[in-house]
Amino acid sequence: MHSSSPARRFREERFTVLAGLALAGFALVIVGLLRLQVVDHEKYVELAKENRVRLEVIRAPRGSIYDRHGELLADSAPSFSIVFRPSPIESTGSTVTARRADWTPRVASLARLDTSEVSERVAFANRSGQTAVLRRDAPFAVLAAVEETRSELPGLEVQVEPLRRYPHGALGAHLLGYAGEINQDELDDRADRGYHLGDLIGRTGVERSYEDILRGRDGAEFVVVNAQGRRVARLSEGPRQQPVPGHDIVLTLDLKVQQALEDAMAGVERGAAVALDPRDGGILALVSRPAFDPNEFSHGLSQARWDRLSSGGANPLLDRAIQGVYPPGSTFKTITTTAALRTGLVTATTRLEPCPGGYQFGGRWFACWKKSGHGSLDLIGAIQNSCDTYFYQLGLKLGLGPLEETARGYGLGERTGVDLPQEARGLVPSAAWYDKRWGPGKWRKGLLLNLAIGQGELLVTPLQLALMMAEVAGDGHAVRPHLVQEVRGVQGFHADKPAQPGVDADPAVWQTLQKGLELVVSSGTGTAARVPGVRVAGKTGTAQNPHGKDHALFACYAPVDSPSVALAFVVENSGHGGTFAAPLAGRVLRRLLLPDSLQTKLKSPARVDTAAVDSSVAHDAD
Amino acid sequence: MRIRWRGRLPEIDTPLALAALGLVAIGLATVYSATSGPGAHQGLWVRQLVWALAALGAAWAIASVHYRAYDSLAWPVYAVSLLLLLLVLAMGTSAYGAKRWLEFGPLKFQPSEIAKLATVLVLARRFDNPKCNLRRVRYWLPALLITLVPFALVAKEPDLGTSLAFPVIFIAMVFWGGMPLGQLMLGLTPLFNVILFFATGSLWWFAGGLTALLVALRPKWPTLLMVLALNGAVAYAMPHLWSHLADYQKRRIETFLNPDHDPSGSGYQIIQSKISIGSGGVVGKGYLRGTQKALAFLPMRHTDFIFSVVGEELGLIGALTVVFSTRWSSCAATDWPW
């Protein structure tokens, strides 16, 4: 010890201070105990006896979703729910059970639910001490029945809860997504983020990707209830915490475009369509078929209904526009052309070996879709007529590297980063990918022929197809596909930077490519997408599919002089792109780009026109 | 320093031992009572008993070594505790979204508990050096760094509550180590800055307080400039940092500073436990006869809120016994006559 006398005194002083602080802390505890157990004893005995203080959650309404013109797409409205409130006696399990044996079957039949479902929810509510919603948005007859018998069924109550509503039903269901009641696992994970039993949580679409913005913050208050569970007073000690509503969200979506796309896709059994604004990547419309009605989820779904929706070949919950992957077929020739022009391999007028109906390579015959052959074509003619033979040769000359690089510049093979959950990546094979699949160096050049016409291992999502067309329209300028334009009450919200680099090429390259694509629609394989008086550029595609009929694809943008929309269509298992996908684009474009007056005049001729084109293209599309 | 093992019962302070044993006994009995109803934690008292016995053995072992011997163990213990904290981050068990526990078979513990002790030991060893003068940067800055490392590791788990124990340890230790009170206050100004900002929502309160402090202390120019620069930076950064936090993070901080504000979370527990304690009265409802304790509404009744079971069943008498025993066991270790 090094304590001389002043040092010791110093320490003693310090110790007195520290000890004094500690003593003060203990004194506070003792004073607190005296206040609770002596002064206010009576009050707490009363509260303990009657029990009873209960925490009631005041649900925060979820933010609404609007389209770019302020049309309502989703909101929350008050509705009556049947809830179970656990009583403390019940939760201890040690005293006489408050519920008689016939409680569960009676409640189940009143609320028209399964007995097992009721007992499961009640058990969880008792474990967690939180109120459980038994039935959301119950019909009036059920509510009346519950109110009448409530005194015999302790714990059962009718409560006002916000209900999620989607006024347009299945329209835009996949992009909006749906919000369902939080389940027990999710609740365990997020207990510290202010979620309560009975809260809604976004499961898919915008509802999920913007969950934190839409949900708001639940309020709460303490109420004193009597033995029947009826509320008699508010507890003065805990201040009422007001719920904070979620933020409203404005989408880039245009209800008019969405409606047009939905109508065009109405007859499609399985498929997807996307409309993008090529200038900024804003999603104007997005359709996936088959669709579902998100309102169903707001009421709570039976297990059987859920199984039907979430599985099977049709799987309506799957958002094919961003989660479905398809071989791009001849739409990929857009990319092969870009790559060939950028590398200076060809120009608009370059002629390759003439097409006799196919191409001989490595001891194998690669057929062109037109068996009679196209004869000698230049690049523009090859795009216009989608000549496979011409593109086989381009693929061989280009090699894998430039093809892959250009495809990635367009955003293929990578997530576009759209603000929707669970986007698929698609696939653009690289040399490394082939090495891994077939063994280093063991893959043959023949696969280049298939890649050049969009077959082989290539896989794209409909959104990526639309993005590709948007980039063609913008001379290779990359945009970020996005769905949310504005979060109300939040300043400076903006879409992220594009995930893909874009395609760097001379203006001449774009001129040539755009001219070729325009000819596809005006007098090539995509004439079904023609719109009188409007220049449309596009590319058809027919994707071979081992499991059935070919998938029909079509991607386009319009008007060519000042592009305002890029479209992509995929119709599963239908046939040629020019026959089954291009006419849908034509229908949408006519509705969007022609003035209303002209549309009514054109209505019947346009349809005849489409039908005529349909049948004429049917036997000679790519 | 040689560690001497005397191989027999160490000299013990009988009142201290009695207080500690009494607390252990009350704790065991209360855990038994709190989990006596049917529920998830039945049988927890057996584990409590096993741990109590193990702790008794450990206490004996620790008491058998002369306390000066721990001086030489300070750094190794500190190093081991940091390693364990790193291990938690790498492979800890998560509960409620945070990794705080290490599990070795049936053994499960929080390394942050060891780190707290280790930090105290290391700081004590450093400050015990007669040359150590905490007026000077070269002595207090390393000590600060020694504290900040475990602090950061625990905060990263994340365990905000426990991590805050480290600054408190540091403050108490430098105070005890002889840092002048004025200097300590100046050093703490960034902390006051943050707290006052959250508590009052404006910087003016703090600015006033700081001015008063500076006028009273009249620090030298370099110190003055440093304090001003530091607080300026903090004041500038706070609103920016705040707007970068996620909503739930903000809510947590707000709840931490003002628990009554969140009745749905911790506030609920507090009200339920107040009802438990208050309804116990002077003599309590009797052991095993509490009515509130088994509320499923009090999910942490067997851990953080165990005291409310004591208050309810054993009343003011039981609660005061616990309070005084705790007080006794912390004071008896020192020679302070209280």
Image (cartoon, rainbow, N blue to C red):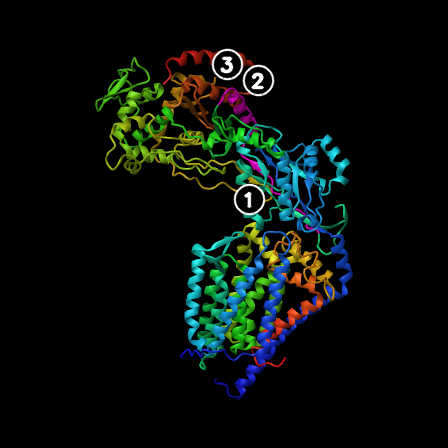
Callouts 1 and 2 on one subunit: yes
Amino acid type, residue under disc 1 in the picture: Glu
Q: Which residue is mark 2?
A: A597
Q: Which residue is mark 3?
A: A606
Please report, as a chain letter, where disc 2 is located.
Answer: A
Contact (Cβ within 8 Å) of mark 1 with mark 2 = no
Q: From this viewpoint, is residue A28 visible?
A: yes
Q: From this viewpoint, is residue B202 visible?
A: no
List x then y, in percent, for residue B3.
Answer: 42, 78
Question: Is residue A541 found inside the magenta-colored segment of the image?
Answer: no
Which label lies toward us, 3 or 1? 1
Callouts 3 and 2 on one subunit: yes
Q: How far is disc 3 from disc 1 in space, using C-alphas?
A: 52 Å
List x then y, in percent, for residue A107.
Answer: 69, 36
Q: Secondary structure at mark 3?
A: helix
Q: Is residue B272 above or below residue A463?
A: below
From the image, which quarter does the C terminus of chain B lie in? bottom right
Residue at the location (66% across, 44% down)? Answer: A131
Q: Which residue is mark 1?
A: A186
Q: What's drawn in magenta, residue-wise?
A: A240-269
Amino acid type, residue under disc 3 in the picture: Ala
